[in-house]
Image: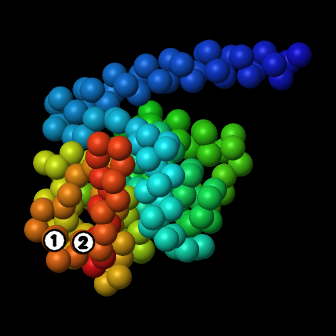
Amino acid sequence: METIRLLIFFLFGITIPAGFLTFGWSMILTNLLGLAPYVPSAKKSLSLILSEANLKKSQIFYDLGSGDGVVLETAVKNYQVKGVGVEINPFLVFLSRLKARFQGIKNLTYIRSDFLKANLAEAQVIFLYLLPRNLPKLQEKIEQECQKGTLIISNSFPLNGWEKKLAKTTKLNHLSAYYYQL
């Protein structure tokens, strides 16, 4: 009985209010600081994006602007990659860590940081679902820090100036995923 009470408290006392706080915090950051809003990737599209990436076990997979962690959870569970999420929103980092712990997902780390300040040198795969205005500085950073062969997956938005690095494009309903190889 105590377990059921704790579960109900967790669901209604923590999770739902955290969702409202997450959304509110995201909107504040978006408007005041010009950051990307919290918009989760659609699960159906995500499955296709990850399957087309040809991920290999133990690859180091970064999600920049990891939001609620669904991309990393899916990649780690289905492809046995090592996941690293970089997210500036402390509520989303907390929620992501909590979800991973309750699901028993290991090999997954969340860093609360601006992705322009995070060290990307270890990344072998980088997932992006960011607004185009955030991409030019990030592209420069990726080119400076990442090794040759790093795969960059951009959900919905192409990376201007990287046409020669474009390995393939996958159609997702009315959008596309873009795969770039350094």
Which residue matches tag 1?
163
Above or below for 150 versus 38: below
x%, y% of residue 5?
78, 15
Crowding at label 1, few (<14), some or many (≥20) Cα neighbours within 10 Å?
few
x%, y% of residue 14?
58, 21
The answer, for residue 109, to whether it is visible in the render is no
Task: Identify the residue at image location x=22%, y=33%.
Answer: 30
Q: Amino acid at mark 1?
A: Glu
Residue 31: quarter of image: top left
Crowding at label 2, few (<14), some or many (≥20) Cα neighbours within 10 Å?
some
x%, y% of residue 153?
34, 62
x%, y% of residue 105?
66, 52
> Dot 1 lies on which element?
helix
Tell whether 90 sits left or right of 143.
right
Residue 163: quarter of image: bottom left
* Screen quadrant of the C terminus: bottom left
- The colour scheme used here is rainbow
* Mark 2 to mark 1 CA distance (whole Å): 5 Å
Which residue matches tag 2?
166
Tell whether 98 sits left or right of 91.
right
Task: Identify the residue at image location x=47%, y=24%.
Answer: 19
